[in-house]
Image (spheres, rainbow, N blue to C red):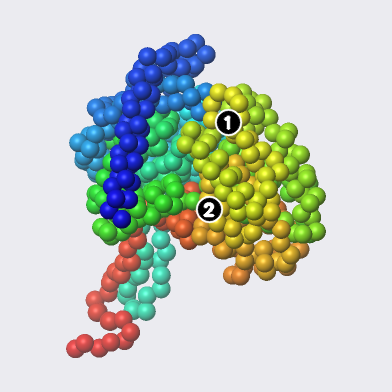
Amino acid sequence: MQRCLTLTLARHSRLLLRSKLASVHCQQSASMSGLLINQPKYSWLKELGLSEDNPGVYNGSWGGSGEVVTSYCPANNEPIARVTQATLAEYEETVQKTREAWKVWADIPAPKRGEIVRQIGDALRKKIKVLGSLVSLEMGKIYVEGVGEVQEYVDICDYAVGLSRMIGGPILPSERPGHALLEQWNPVGLVGIITAFNFPVAVYGWNNAIALTCGNVCLWKGAPTTPLTSVAVTKIVAEVLEQNNLPGAICSMTCGGADIGTAMAKDERVDLLSFTGSTHVGKMVAMMVQERFGRKLLELGGNNAIIVFEDADLNLVVPSAVFASVGTAGQRCTTTRRLMLHESVHDAVVERIAKAYKQVRIGDPWDPSTLYGPLHTKQAVDQYLAAIEQAKQQGGTVICGGKVMDRPGNYVEPTIITGLAHDAPIVHTETFVPILYVLKFKTEEEAFAWNNEVKQGLSSSIFTKDMGRVFRWLGPKGSDCGIVNVNIPTSGAEIGGAFGGEKHTGGGRESGSDSWKQYMRRSTCTINYSKDLPLAQGIKFE
């Protein structure tokens, strides 16, 4: 046993050494080769205030003296530009400045705060195409999705402006004469926001616009692989704050890795931590925040299903399933990963979807005609290959795709796999790649049960014309997800509704509806305006 452990540690040490050498080689290659930002084709990056080397800390002033990271384009794996991340000392300074800024921001009336958020939305509108192009270049999603993501931030700003004149609690009937009973809502204070690579603009926007309107200040740590987007967005927001003579630290940013994220999770000065990412990391974040009895808002994984019944309109099913499984190259938390088909329509739907897959236009993500771009990282390509191999071992058949594409960048073929059991381990595993598992079912009860048997509970959808089935699906014995759709895909949520899911998805809610309540603290207030002191429940204490 000891010998095995020694050998394992030795192998681990060799792997670490190789990893470090590879990292050094990559960094040297990035510095020696030309950066995309210096090529005329990408000169538009400078319209966002970006340069070869960019500071990754903002707290009213720009800085950063930590690790220098290079951002790469997933479509060709060429270096775009560099960002200097925050040190823990700079994180500490930023938290202090952000909390000081809250003292100013909290005193501003909510409608006035809404006006600042309106200006942020307008500033984003002016840069929507160029910022969308950056999202496409750095994250890898197609151009129209990059622009659409910025549009989500704009839309939630519009929503938050209206919200700024509507936030309030009820006045409740008091059982005691001469007393008023009411609810008062106040900002929590400092909202920490940790976002993922797949939506490097929109998720921050959902949190930022609502948190600001509620009277909070924000500290943002974006994904380490999309730092240029974090810097560009922060520059746009900072300019609005500075033009209004407000502290820039109201919307602070610290680029960094796990060290900064851990510091935020453990920091009692972070009154609410909003985390978007994997269930694995989210669980660790939740435990760190809970250890200090802090507030958390978790948006984690999803293993989402579309269920197609025998009466479904297949002209709706096919484009919906293709968009939801292929869009963003399968890298949305709401991506359809399981397609459950009634046995009577199974073969026909598989044939039509496989044909549609082969017609998906694959290419450079910033080409307006492209519908499908690369995976974000080389590691994702490895995960894609590993998942396909596991699916084959568990009885699956690849009927479409299944290969890495022979071209620069992290391109893989969108893949369809049939023949797996509904409870096969790989089917119950959320793999963040474009693999669609097709399952065959017989009854409504079976399909509903399969939808709910996975650990995540984010998004779900059925296709049917049976209104009784629709309401059973929406009811207590139907889908257990936070997003429950009918005759539309699992992805593509609107900002007006609350976004989030149940179970291992984390239970958090962002964006619309009453999600604003997560960014505020509620006090129940009783005011005695009489000269008497009656007690509740008729208690006499004389």
Residue positioned 59% across, 70% down in the render? 476
Decide: few, some or many residues near mark 2? Use Cα within 10 Å; few <14, some 14-19, many ≥20.
Answer: some
Considering the image in quadrants, where does the N terminus appear? bottom left
The x, y position of residue 73, in whole percent, is 48, 25
Q: Label 2 vs label 1: CA separation?
A: 22 Å
Residue positioned 35% across, 61% down in the render? 522
The x, y position of residue 374, in whole percent, is 56, 31
In this picture, residue 83 sits left or right of residue 308: left
Q: Amino acid at mark 2?
A: Thr
Vertical relation: 505 (above or below) 277: below
Examine the image and state in which quarter residue 474 appears: bottom right
Q: In the rendered structure, find residue 337 and report the number of the disc placed on it.
A: none
The residue that label 1 is drawn on is: 411
Vertical relation: 220 (above or below) 511: above
Residue positioned 44% across, 56% down in the render? 506
**Counting residues from the N terminus, which is met first, the one under dot 2 or under dot 1?**
1
Examine the image and state in which quarter residue 62 appears: top left
